Image (cartoon, helix red, strand yellow):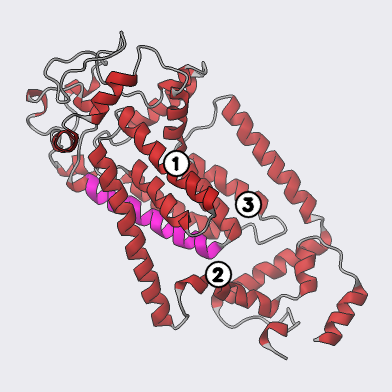
């Protein structure tokens, strides 16, 4: 009898991780024998989806990272009913959430250490590359006094950064937990490497530079008084003069959330702007908005077909346009963010290959097959069918046993 033909399900595996997975399987199988877990799962997922839609429609749901992670975790717990131990959501996602919470709590470290803020570095780099500041040029040619219908799209793209990476992580967790671990490793890596940039080179974004003059930021302050003034024409500001093509838009301003006014849902804009005010205002180098979306495109490139590749790549490019047009980032910030994403991919790939060579487990590309192998050695077809709620004919089961 070969290893993959073993019909037994009650012999516990040897390693601690396999024993844990075996215990989860036994618990799920016991529940599946007593309840119609397929129906329960479908009802629970429906309730979760309706709740999320209601919270969004009533403008109650916040887009803070912790709230998004909790919503994703609850959805994954609902989708796990009858498939795996619901508590595995906590086991897998709690460390991920804790690391992100640590990242959020340390983003203001540059101000604590007294690192001088770079107000001219990115402006000079963009002007050297393009002979103009791209943010100024885009707002001169596209921005109007009032938000236009197409700014709904840019506002939605900007906001999606706070949801899409974690939604993709949830999808990968349900589909292939090995790939989920690889993705979350890269996500954590890019956040903490970006944090090093924020600490060592704190830099002001375009919308802040448009409010201040060189004399007002000569001391390298992170929060000079000029940064809190309302948007207005500031002579001799760091970005230079604005020559608008449309009346009523004579200065550069932060417009990443004003598209929601077109839909007459101003409270959504208020929620986003409150979150922006609480965030690190001088965390521009590198742009993690650009870096994370590029990381998504790179990671999913070999895991999706042509349509998926087009969507993820297009998402990264549209995000780049949104960030520059809305005065959230300079182009140099985007380039550094993309470079950081590529660096994370290369380092993590190399580290994983070295790890698997050391453990003698073969190449990284065979991770999924390696993780699935213990399941085929301990779970029979009848047990798998029970988990999925499929009726199994006893005669067919006896025939299968005789064949084995």
Q: Earlier in the sequence, mark 3 or mark 1?
A: 3
The residue pinned by badge 1 equals 315
Range of residues picked out in magenta: 177-198
* Image quadrant where one finds the N terminus: bottom right
Mark 2, Cα crowd under 10 Å, few <14 / some 14-19 / many 20+, is few
| Between marks 2 and 1 in the image, the one whose residue lies nearer the viewer | 1
Can residue 320 be seen by looking at this rendering? Answer: yes
| Between marks 3 and 1 in the image, the one whose residue lies nearer the viewer | 1
In this orientation, which residue lies closer to the viewer: 309 or 71? Answer: 309
Q: Earlier in the sequence, mark 2 or mark 1?
A: 1
* Image quadrant where one finds the C terminus: bottom right
Which residue extends farthest right?
395
The Cα–Cα distance between marks 3 and 1, rounded to whole angstroms, is: 28 Å
Can residue 253 be seen by looking at this rendering? Answer: no
The residue pinned by badge 3 equals 77
Q: In which image quadrant can residue 4 be found?
A: bottom right
The residue pinned by badge 2 equals 368
Quick check: marks 2 and 1 in contact, CB under 8 Å? no
């Amino acid at each position: 009898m070969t290893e993959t033909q073993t019909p037994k399900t009650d012999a516990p595996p040897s390693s601690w991780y396999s024993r844990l997975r075996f215990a989860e399987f036994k618990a799920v199988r016991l529940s599946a024998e007593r309840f119609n877990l397929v129906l329960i799962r479908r009802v629970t997922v429906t309730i979760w989806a309706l709740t999320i839609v209601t919270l969004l429609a009533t403008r109650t749901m916040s887009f803070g990272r912790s709230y998004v992670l909790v919503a994703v975790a609850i959805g994954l717990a609902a989708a796990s009913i009858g498939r795996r131990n619901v508590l595995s959501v906590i086991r897998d996602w709690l460390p991920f959430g804790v690391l992100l919470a640590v990242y959020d709590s340390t983003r203001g470290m540059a101000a604590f250490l007294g690192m001088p803020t770079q107000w001219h570095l990115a402006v000079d780099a963009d002007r050297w590359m393009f002979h103009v500041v791209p943010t100024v040029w885009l707002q001169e040619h596209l921005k109007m006094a009032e938000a236009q219908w197409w700014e709904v799209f840019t506002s939605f793209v900007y906001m999606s950064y706070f949801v899409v990476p974690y939604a993709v992580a949830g999808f990968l967790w349900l589909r292939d937990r090995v790939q989920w671990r690889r993705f979350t490793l890269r996500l954590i890596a890019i956040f903490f490497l970006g944090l090093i940039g924020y600490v060592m080179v704190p830099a002001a974004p375009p919308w802040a530079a448009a409010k201040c003059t060189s004399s007002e930021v000569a001391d390298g302050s992170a929060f000079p008084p000029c940064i809190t003034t309302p948007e207005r024409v500031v002579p001799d500001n760091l970005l230079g003069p604005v020559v608008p093509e449309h009346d009523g838009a004579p200065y550069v301003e932060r417009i990443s959330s004003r598209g929601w006014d077109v839909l007459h849902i101003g409270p959504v804009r208020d929620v986003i702007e409150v979150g922006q005010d609480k965030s690190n205002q001088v965390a521009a180098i590198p742009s993690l908005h650009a870096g994370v979306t590029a990381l998504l495109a790179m990671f999913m490139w070999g895991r999706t077909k042509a349509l998926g590749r087009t969507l993820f790549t297009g998402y990264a490019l549209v995000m780049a346009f949104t960030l520059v047009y809305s005065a959230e980032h300079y182009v140099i910030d985007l380039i550094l963010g993309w470079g950081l994403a590529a660096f994370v991919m290369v380092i993590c790939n190399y580290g994983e290959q070295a790890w698997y060579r050391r453990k003698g487990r073969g190449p990284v590309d065979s991770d999924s097959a390696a993780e699935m192998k213990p399941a085929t050695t301990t779970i029979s077809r009848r047990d798998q069918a029970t988990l999925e709620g499929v009726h199994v004919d006893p005669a067919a089961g006896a025939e299968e046993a005789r064949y084995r």
